[in-house]
């Protein structure tokens, strides 16, 4: 069974997609390990820039060790085995403004976006997106249209002043925690 309700004897698989946005450096401790504690199997895919960042600081290796799966940021070659099991829900967190725009416009120019774009078009595979943006991103004329496009595709957005108040660029409090728990709550509700 792929997506939708999960049978009680099958462990749910959460496809975590991290992008080059602030907070991706704590993806393991903020989202992946709590998801594992909640009973999910977790498979991580990163955009190329996020993959570069997390390989450089050793986090990609720690993510692979925690999940038991390789961290992907490149497509596999034709004929290669799939390194991750089928996913019951995708979570894109943190999602950069660039990633949100690409998802809304169907641009799948890397492994992470290819997986999520396919899931958006697949019945029964929910997608949860946490846009990690600032007030300037949200004022861009295309921003609301991008969010509305994703909502119309039934993408669940972890977004709004109650979840992630927007600040002007460089005005946010330093090291403010991302709403990881809310992201996991959305994933669990989407697969219930």
Image (cartoon, helix red, strand yellow):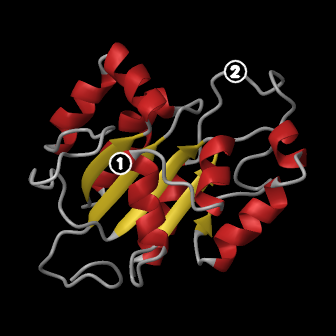
Rendered position, 109 above or below 151: above
Measuring 16% from the left and 44% from the top, which residue is drawn there? 69
* Residue 47 visible: yes
In terms of sequence position, does the residue under pointer 2 or pointer 1 come before the other? 1
Q: Quadrant of residue 155?
A: bottom right
Residue 113 place in picture, x, y as percent: 46, 52
The answer to whether the residues at label 2 and label 1 have Cβ atoms under 8 Å apart is no
Q: Position of residue 109 (x, y in %)?
A: 48, 47
Residue 76 position (above or below residue 54): below
Residue 100 horizontal side relative to residue 7, left or right:
right
Q: Would you name the residue on which mark 1 appears?
A: 34
Residue 95 picture quarter: top right
Give the crowd class for mark 2: few <14, some 14-19, many >=20 residues within 10 Å. Answer: few
Label of residue 76 in the image: none
Q: Nearer the viewer, residue 13 or 35?
A: 13
Secondary structure of the residue carrying tag 1 is helix
């Amino acid at each position: 069974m792929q997506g939708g309700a999960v049978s009680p004897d099958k462990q749910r698989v959460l496809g975590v997609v991290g992008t080059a946005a602030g907070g991706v450096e704590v993806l393991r401790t903020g989202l992946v390990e709590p998801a594992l504690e909640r009973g999910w199997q977790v498979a991580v895919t990163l955009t190329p820039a996020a993959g570069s960042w997390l390989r450089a600081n050793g986090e990609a290796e720690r993510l692979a060790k925690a999940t038991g799966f390789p961290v992907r940021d490149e497509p596999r070659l034709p004929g290669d085995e799939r390194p991750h099991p089928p996913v019951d829900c995708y979570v894109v967190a943190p999602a950069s403004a660039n990633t949100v725009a690409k998802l809304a416009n169907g641009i799948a120019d890397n492994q992470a976006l290819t997986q999520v774009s396919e899931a958006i078009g697949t019945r029964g595979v929910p997608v949860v997106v946490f846009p990690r943006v600032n007030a300037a991103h949200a004022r861009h004329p295309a921003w609301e249209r991008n969010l509305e496009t994703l909502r119309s595709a039934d993408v669940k957005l972890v977004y709004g002043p109650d979840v992630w108040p927007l600040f002007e660029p460089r005005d946010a409090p330093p090291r403010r925690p991302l709403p990881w728990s809310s992201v996991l709550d959305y994933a669990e509700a989407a697969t219930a």
